Image (cartoon, rainbow, N blue to C red):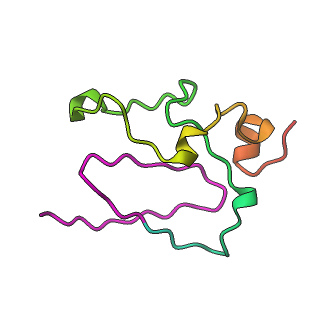
Amino acid sequence: MTILVTGAAVPPSFAHGFMVTSESADFLYKTTDYYAPEHERCVAWDDPTIGIDRPLAQNGIDNPLLSAKDRRGLSLSKANGGGAAALSGRNSP
């Protein structure tokens, strides 16, 4: 078994995501404050307006296994009702 340990700094209110191609993975968050789900937003992993090319077929993934939260993800324009400006923490026009 190979164990890879990496980390990434994600600023508060910054959209982020990851794709696991192994059988399992642990992802731990180090936060700047207590978890507040009422402030959380979820953008759909496959929203075409974001333009992320995920290597699903190259990794033999036909149907990605998504969490319940990720299955409820909204388009970027609908997440929080203000589009990209709302997701970045700026005031919506």
Residue visible at 66% across and 69% down in the picture: 35
Name the foreground residue: 65 vs 28: 65
How many numbered callouts? 0
Q: Point out residue 29 in the picture as x, y percentages from the top left corner.
A: 50, 68
Q: Which residues are magenta?
A: 1-27
Question: Is-magenta flag for residue 17?
Answer: yes
Residue visible at 23% across and 64% down in the picture: 4
Name the foreground residue: 28 vs 84: 28
Image quarter hosting the N terminus: bottom left
The furthest residue to the left: 1
Residue visible at 55% across and 29% down in the picture: 47
Image quarter hosting the C terminus: top right
Q: Point out residue 57 in the picture as x, y percentages from the top left corner.
A: 26, 27
Q: Please give left or right for residue 67 compared with residue 69 in the image.
A: left
The furthest residue to the right: 93
Residue visible at 57% across and 47% down in the picture: 69
Name the foreground residue: 33 vs 90: 33
Q: Point out residue 78 in the picture as x, y percentages from the top left corner.
A: 73, 32
Vertical order, 24 against 62 (above or below)? below
Magenta span: chief secondary structure = loop
Vertical order, 64 against 27 (above or below)? above
The furthest residue to the top: 48
Q: Please give left or right for residue 49 compared with residue 56 in the image.
A: right
Name the foreground residue: 68 vs 51: 68
Res 77 quadrant in image: top right
Vertical order, 73 against 29 (above or below)? above
Question: Is-magenta flag for residue 12?
Answer: yes
